[in-house]
Image (spheres, rainbow, N blue to C red):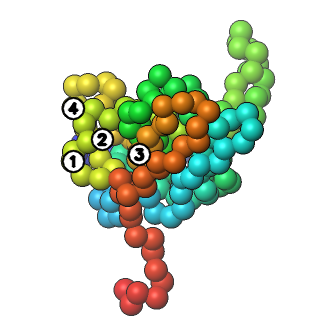
């Protein structure tokens, strides 16, 4: 674990974009460290996965609103029910797949940038999420844990992921999904104000 660095403010100091970004990164990394070391990681609440087929999308699944902490400490919040179509993974039918969720950011609020060739820059970032399907390398290990080799770029990216379910797609794309296993996910107990602490 490396020490965190933050800008030091004093009268007369000229602030740059790097200073302000550095202050934000310091606060974000402190929160990630707090989440990781004090609370752990996993699904805190919600994020249930269920088959939700319709006439045109037999492999559609739904994910309920909820909250998770990623192994790297990022908070992942899903504010509204979300649908996800597994049809693009038809080639993986009859093999188990993992549906995982990761923290993401969405840039919004375009604002003109005077004095540059840039027409507009996003002025805000919204915390968001992305759902990803991966093929597990093996079926062993801790529930919800993905293999992580620090020299493997793909594995490092997976380290920010929380497993929501293991899904076995049927052999035929017209058959509905009937195998969604959420026992593989790692749970994290939500705060209970009545537990006496």
Q: Secondary structure at mark 3?
A: strand
Q: CA distance from mark 2 to mark 1?
A: 8 Å
In terms of sequence position, does the residue under pointer 1 or pointer 4 come before the other? 1
Relative height, residue 193 to residue 27 (above, below): below
* Circle 4 residue: 149
Q: Quadrant of the N terminus?
A: top left
* Circle 1 residue: 141
Q: Secondary structure at mark 2?
A: loop
Question: Residue 66: image x %, image y %?
Answer: 56, 59
Q: Residue at x 54, y 62 (%)?
A: 46
Q: Quadrant of the C terminus?
A: bottom left
Q: Which mark is residue 146?
A: 2
Looking at the image, do the residues carrying marks 3 and 4 touch, with CB atoms under 8 Å apart? no
Q: Nearer the viewer, mark 3 or mark 2?
A: 3
Q: CA distance from mark 1 to mark 3?
A: 14 Å
Relative height, residue 118 to residue 110 (above, below): above
In terms of sequence position, does the residue under pointer 1 or pointer 3 come before the other? 1
Q: Nearer the viewer, mark 1 or mark 4?
A: 1
């Amino acid at each position: 674990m490396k020490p965190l660095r933050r800008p030091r403010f004093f009268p007369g100091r000229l602030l740059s974009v790097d200073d302000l970004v550095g202050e934000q990164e310091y606060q974000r990394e402190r929160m990630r460290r707090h989440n990781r070391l004090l609370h752990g990681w996993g699904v805190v609440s919600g994020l249930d996965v269920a088959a939700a087929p319709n006439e045109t999308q037999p492999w559609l699944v739904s994910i309920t609103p909820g909250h998770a902490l990623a192994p790297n400490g990022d908070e992942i919040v899903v504010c509204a029910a979300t649908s996800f179509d597994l049809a693009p993974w038809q080639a993986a039918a009859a093999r188990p797949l993992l549906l995982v969720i990761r923290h993401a950011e969405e840039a919004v609020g375009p604002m003109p940038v005077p004095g540059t060739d840039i027409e507009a820059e996003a002025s805000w970032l919204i915390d968001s999420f992305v759902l990803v399907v991966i093929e597990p390398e093996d079926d062993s290990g801790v529930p919800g844990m993905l293999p992580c080799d620090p020299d493997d770029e793909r594995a490092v990216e997976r380290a920010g992921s929380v497993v929501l379910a293991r899904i076995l797609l049927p052999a035929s794309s017209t058959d509905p999904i009937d195998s969604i296993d959420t026992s593989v996910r790692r749970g994290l107990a939500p705060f209970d104000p009545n537990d006496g602490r």
